Amino acid sequence: MNDDELRGVFDRMASAYDSKVARMAPINNGLYFLLESVLAELPQEARILCVGVGTGTELIHLAGVFPGWRFTAVEPSGAMLDVCRTRVGEVDLSSRCHFHEGYLESLPLEEMYDAATCFLVSQFILDAQARSDFFRQIANRLLPGGILANSDLSADVESEDYDALLAVWQRVMATSTVSAEGLDRMKSGYAKDVAILPSAALASIIESGGFDRPVQFFQAGLIHGWFAKRATATHAQHVGRTDPNHPARTGDP
Ligand SMILES: C[S@@+](CC[C@H](N)C(=O)[O-])C[C@H]1O[C@@H](n2cnc3c(N)ncnc32)[C@H](O)[C@@H]1O
């Protein structure tokens, strides 16, 4: 799927997205619970970049736990972002959020962030180099020591266990009866549109995008979570202190 096709998929899914993923709440709550501790040492007034924020679930969770934090929500699907804006407004968080409809490339380089979340996004970038470049764009937006928290579907699709794991995952996701045909459809859909890699391979792609060695802090079914600090070289290499676009708030020593 190219970017336009993927955006179309999420545009069409937006109004039903939250009810579709409601079943996954125990998994997401586990992920967010651990995420709180991953990010616990950030400043009280931290700025957080939420890449592929979707309908805003992770942003709303973090904003509730850390009342001094401010958020930039990046989302290419206008319909997903509209749902996010509405939900954020309903819980009175709009004044702490900036919404950017589009990709990271078009987000003005006006501020640097203490941390970024990127949940279930990079898996749609099938080419490994493009996926590494995507992580580098995130690294380039982070302050020194800034933390990326990333989640993606991950598995060794070549392993003997994959079919059995996928069958369990199908039951986890299923809103109706599961079938052998449904399982085949899921398997071929993932093979075509989702880059499901073993954990070590994905960690290595994140690292190649300008991060220290990622730490896997979460797994539930196919969903894995990693955190990683921005590697010290990234900033000098790719943004540069003398860059006229370099934002004032760098925190560089
Ligand atoms: C599966 S949803 C996850 C949404 C949210 N992070 C969550 O965990 O509920 C993936 C989201 O990433 C967005 N997305 C896809 N490709 C992206 C990209 N290259 N950059 C930013 N967002 C992207 C999609 O539009 C979609 O809203």
Image (cartoon, rainbow, N blue to C red):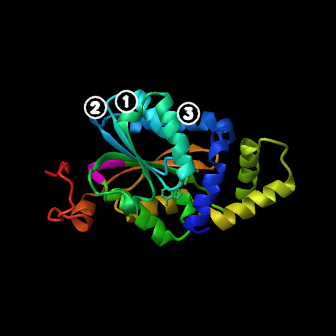
**Disc 1 residue type?**
Phe
Question: Is 102 left, or right, of 184 in this rendering?
Answer: left
Image coords of residue 204 (percent x, y): 44, 63
Magenta highlight range: 142-147
Check if residue 136 falls in the magenta segment. Answer: no
* Residue 29 tag number: 3
Nearest to N terminus: mark 3 or mark 1: 3
The residue at the point 47 percent across, 70 percent down is 130
Q: Please, is residue 214 above or below residue 69 in the view?
A: below
Quarter placement of the N terminus? bottom right
Image coords of residue 10 (percent x, y): 61, 53
**Disc 3 residue type?**
Asn
Select label 3 or label 1 by which is in front. 1
Question: Is 67 left, or right, of 82 in this rendering?
Answer: left
Q: Residues within 10 Å of mark 1 (few under 14, many from 20)?
A: some
In depth, the one of 148 and 176 nearer the eye is 176
Q: Secondary structure at mark 3?
A: helix
The residue at the point 56 percent across, 44 percent down is 219
Nearest to N terminus: mark 2 or mark 1: 2
- What residue is shown with label 1? 66
Check if residue 145 falls in the magenta segment. Answer: yes
**Disc 2 residue type?**
Gln
Nearest to N terminus: mark 3 or mark 2: 3
Q: Residues within 10 Å of mark 2 (few under 14, many from 20)?
A: few
Count of numbered marks: 3
